[in-house]
Image (tube, helix red, strand yellow):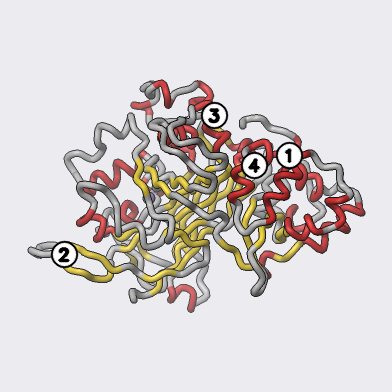
Amino acid sequence: MTDLNHTHDPAARSWVASANAPGTDFPLQNLPLGVFSVGDAAPRIGIAIGHQVLDLSAVLASDLIANQNLSPQARAALQACTGQSLNAVMALGPAASQALRHTVFDWLHAQAPAAQQAALKPCLLDQDAVRMHLPAQVGDYTDFYTSIYHATNVGKLFRPDNPLLPNYRWVPIGYHGRASSLQVSGTAFHRPRGQVMPAGATQPELQASQRLDYELELGVFVGRGNAVGASITLDQALHHVFGVCLLNDWSARDVQAWEYQPLGPFLAKNFATTISAWVVTLEALAPYRVALQRPPEDADRPDLPYLHSLENRQHGAYDIRLQVGLRSAAMRQAGLDVHWVCHTSYRHAYWTIAQLVAHHTVNGCNLQPGDLLGTGTLSGPTPQEAGALLELTQGGKLPLTLPSGEARTFLQDGDEVVMRAYCEAPGRVRLGLGECVAQVLPAR
Ligand code: MN
């Protein structure tokens, strides 16, 4: 999975002009997959290229495929892209994903034969003209807790004497989340109601959450699964991962504080989780792999053998730059742009994607194609890198000021939270994961 090839060549250009624009999230080297629809038509699978979507069903129906000498892997991957979700192509594993990527790279390359370009042009749609859907049918959703900075900051608020529990440095902590309320970017949701214990009260109340928060996370889509009872080793783990998206794990902190002991998050988390629409494959992210870098006091601490390899230590992390912004109703009305409140990178995570997969299956738990693993809130080492309002405002004690003059501790009705992610490295093109955005509606 570390191997770089001609599809990572930073000099490669596409005949789709918008794919060559500086700052685009979707250059030729990215080619993320997603599910879209036009009007009332059924959802279909597409690949983002610049500001366009390549409609794979339209390509399959065209003469191009009949006339092409495709490898069996590429043909199987394309056939798996005729459904309404990515599950079938995820299930085929990394060789098929790679064949698909390399085929589409050749088709969209600036040097593709003119006849090929002419055959593909009718299969391109403007991204503004399509509606995006969840990319996969997610059977199970697990949320981890992989930022030691987040775990420590939150631990200090909930347990000042004992912020980081002793298991943290040994176990990639996680819990089983709720797949049914996953929503694609752009879907507004209602503020949840829940049971809370007001300060000084003697009994709890049911009320609209007053401490609604976001969590900046990445979502990891499982590709090929494993049989129940059969673990996935660390060395094999990335062969079972299809790709990555942005994920916002909306959290009702007042509900969470009252309900979380002893079994962990429940109704504070399961009312809505928003993900970005495009899934960026691990192959596209290969140039941005970096060494696992833990805090200095943990740098030499060994992991248990099933979570340790030299490869994982040297190349297991990804430098994916992450941003969170806020835009209130008043800011929208005044025409003000998103106010960015957090800039960090996924490289600060304590546990790698491979370690999450190896740990999740070490007991024989089976992962299935389309399962989603959340990384947990991705806070970095400095206060400006906090991935949730709970940390940024120190539990609501230090309000933020928005460009409209409004103060925020937690989210208000009408607020939009915008997350962005992108990769850049010397000698590499910039590519992005697109946006993960949603607006908070009043409680029902
Ligand atoms: Mn979370």
Asked whether, in this view, residue 255 is left or right of residue 351, the answer is left
Residue 215 x %, y %: 39, 54
At label 3, counting other C-alpha atoms closer than 10 Å, the crowd grade (few under 14, some 14-19, many 20 or more) is: few
> Which residue is outermost to the bottom?
333
Q: Is residue 327 visible?
A: no
Q: Amino acid at mark 4?
A: Ala
User: Is the C-beta separation of discs 4 and 1 under 8 Å?
Assistant: no
Q: CA–CA distance between discs 4 and 2?
A: 48 Å
The picture quadrant where one finds residue 119 is bottom right
- Which residue lies under the disc numbered 3? 236
- Which residue lies under the disc numbered 4? 284
Secondary element under disc 4, as helix, strand or loop, is helix
Lower position in the chain sequence, tag 4 or tag 3: 3
- Which numbered marker is on residue 198? 2
Lower position in the chain sequence, tag 4 or tag 2: 2
Please name which of the two marks, 2 or 3, marks the residue nearer to the observer: 3
Lower position in the chain sequence, tag 4 or tag 1: 1
Residue 277 x %, y %: 57, 58
Q: Amino acid at mark 2?
A: Pro
Please name which of the two marks, 4 or 1, marks the residue nearer to the observer: 1
Lower position in the chain sequence, tag 2 or tag 1: 1
Image height check: is 43 above or below 140? below
Q: CA–CA distance between discs 3 and 1?
A: 20 Å
Q: Residue at x 73, y 59 (%)?
A: 55
Residue 320 x %, y %: 54, 43
- Which residue lies under the disc numbered 1? 73
